[in-house]
Amino acid sequence: FIYFASSNERISKNFIFFIYILYAKTFWKKVFFFCAIPSMLLTAYGAKKIHDKEGHFDQSKYVEYPYLNVRNKPFPWGDGNHSLFHNKKTQFTPGIGFEEKDH
């Protein structure tokens, strides 16, 4: 049995598909504006609140344990004693300490 759709039926199927696409577009637009953006803003607010609560990194409270900052072989860049994304204020360097002191 082979079914041949008439041109009117084909137009109505295309119209229904077009309406479905419009509905899907508006649905995902609403999801973005009413779910995604507010959740990102709430997450950013919570992260900022936690960051403000923790305060400033205190270098004087740092305890140098023997199992931290172990260098079995030097890094292949720079002087070999600093990691690739080294932060002079917050990362302890073995043998040197903190390179920039807190003010």
Image (spheres, rainbow, N blue to C red):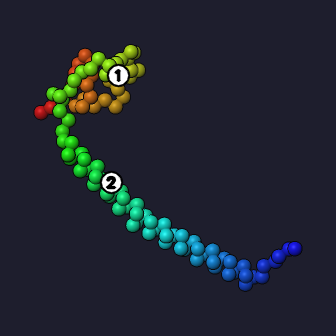
Q: Quadrant location of residue 30?
A: bottom left
Q: Is residue 29 left or right of residue 56?
A: right
Above or below, 11 relative to 79: below
Amino acid under disc 2: Thr
Work out which quarter of the rendered image holds the C terminus and state it: top left
Q: Residue furthest left?
A: 103
Q: Residue at x 26, y 28 (%)?
A: 91
Q: Earlier in the sequence, mark 1 or mark 2?
A: 2
Tell me the distance, in whole angstroms, between the alpha carbons under discs 1 and 2. 37 Å
Q: Position of residue 71 (x, y in %)?
A: 35, 17
Packing grade of label 2 (10 A; few <14, some 14-19, many >=20) is few
Residue 55: give its label: none
The residue identified by callout 2 is 43
Q: Residue at x 36, y 59 (%)?
A: 39
Amino acid under disc 1: Gly
Above or below, 34 relative to 92: below
Q: Residue at x 69, y 81 (%)?
A: 11
Q: Position of residue 97 (x, y in %)?
A: 22, 21
Packing grade of label 1 (10 A; few <14, some 14-19, many >=20) is few
